[in-house]
Image: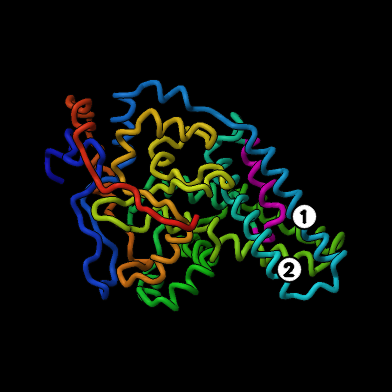
Amino acid sequence: MPAHTQRDDPRHPLYLGAWKRSAKADLQDFVRDDFDEPHHKRRKAILAKHPEVKQLYGNEPLTAVIGAAAVAVQLTAAYLVGCVWTDLHWGLVVAIAYLLGGSVCALYGVIIHEAGHNLVFKRPFYNRLTGLLANLPMVVPISQSFRRYHLEHHQFQGVEGMDPDMPLDAEVKYIHNSPLLKTLWVFCYSAMYVARGIVMKKQPQRWEVANLLFTVAADVLIVRLMSVRALAYLAVSVFFGYGMHPGAAHFIQEHYIFRDGQETYSYYGTGNILYLNIGLHNEHHDFPQIPWTRIYALRRIAAEFYDPLYAHTSWCAVIFKFITSPMQGPQSRLARLYKAHVSGRKDYRVPADHDDAVSTTTAPAAAAATCT
């Protein structure tokens, strides 16, 4: 690592890289960089100029209330489908599972995400319980494993072999840029996410075991108190909510490369209203201590850091572009070695000229789109 990166990072103040995204449609490898991820340093730069951002740190108990309401909605729908509307055609059941169930399940993911960062309550134990609550109608144990691996993703963003959010070599090799295979990949994204965790071969933690037992007990109760049909409705809802659904598009929006030099992307569209501002991903990675109710305040305070970055305005467009573009695929991610990740932060300080540098830096404006 060159000496200048150990004190003054040349990517300052926006921490955009000089690397180019894949310029060849047949390239079957990740884009690579020799620097650390940008969020640790951008957080320091923002705090140096706007120390009042720390006042936004904290918790939002309202998230648990929204989670409980969402669980009630989905269990009610499962009861109606499984016990009342027993003659309803399976085609209509699938439609309900997509339009209602998928939308609600995508919201569960956001609530589990907030709980994973301990942003719901001050005590981690109650955040764990909030995650389990949201996991109740999801058929498969998700919340505690997501918490574990998502925090590792924040710690080791883009680090090969350590970031569980990075696609597997098999995904890159077999999916690549085929529109048909990418469509199937988006549909089955939940399975891909689970597979990445399994490949890392880590021993389950006690909360993950508790999550498994809790979910099995919940599934048994749903079958006994409702029906197998009700459980099937819930399972199909999870499949849609974590796959080909606008509410799940943020999984692609967040780190798949759409512009040179930028590895993390935010979404500023109306979907943030339903999904608790999950689209503000640059802001979240910069400040994971800020709950969803205050993350827009961060963007307003530090607008000069975020306005120049490329951002999405349509989750529908994200999915469409990803599937149809020969430049997009599981390989459209930035990768780095652990050595570069660590050494890039060594002895780092925010450059003294940060006040002037931010205001004069420009970058591509946010993308225009029509479908949210």
In depth, the one of 178 and 150 nearer the eye is: 178
Residue 135 among those drawn in magenta: yes
Horizontally, residue 359 falls left or right of residue 149, namely left
As measured in the structure, the alpha-carbon distance from the residue carrying label 2 to the one carrying label 1 is 12 Å
In depth, the one of 83 and 368 nearer the eye is: 368
| Main SS category, magenta section | helix
Q: Position of residue 323 (x, y in %)?
A: 41, 70
In the rendered view, how is the structure colored? Answer: rainbow
Q: Which mark is residue 125?
A: none
In depth, the one of 61 and 204 nearer the eye is: 61
Residue 273, quarter of picture: top right
Few, some or many C-alpha atoms within 10 Å of disc 2 (few <14, some 14-19, many ≥20)? some
User: Where 261 falls versus 290 (above or below)?
Assistant: below
Q: Which residue is mark 2?
A: 232
Find numbered disc 2 in the image and state the secondary structure of the residue it sits on: helix
Residues rendered magenta in the picture: 125-140
Few, some or many C-alpha atoms within 10 Å of disc 1 (few <14, some 14-19, many ≥20)? many
Residue at x-position 80% and y-position 65%: 81
Q: Position of residue 222 (x, y in %)?
A: 80, 59
Residue 19, quarter of picture: bottom left
Residue 42 among those drawn in magenta: no
Kind of residue at disc 1: Leu
Kind of residue at disc 2: Ala
Residue at x-position 33% and y-position 63%: 332
Q: Position of residue 175 (x, y in %)?
A: 40, 75
Q: Which residue is mark 1?
A: 75
Q: Position of residue 151 (x, y in %)?
A: 47, 45
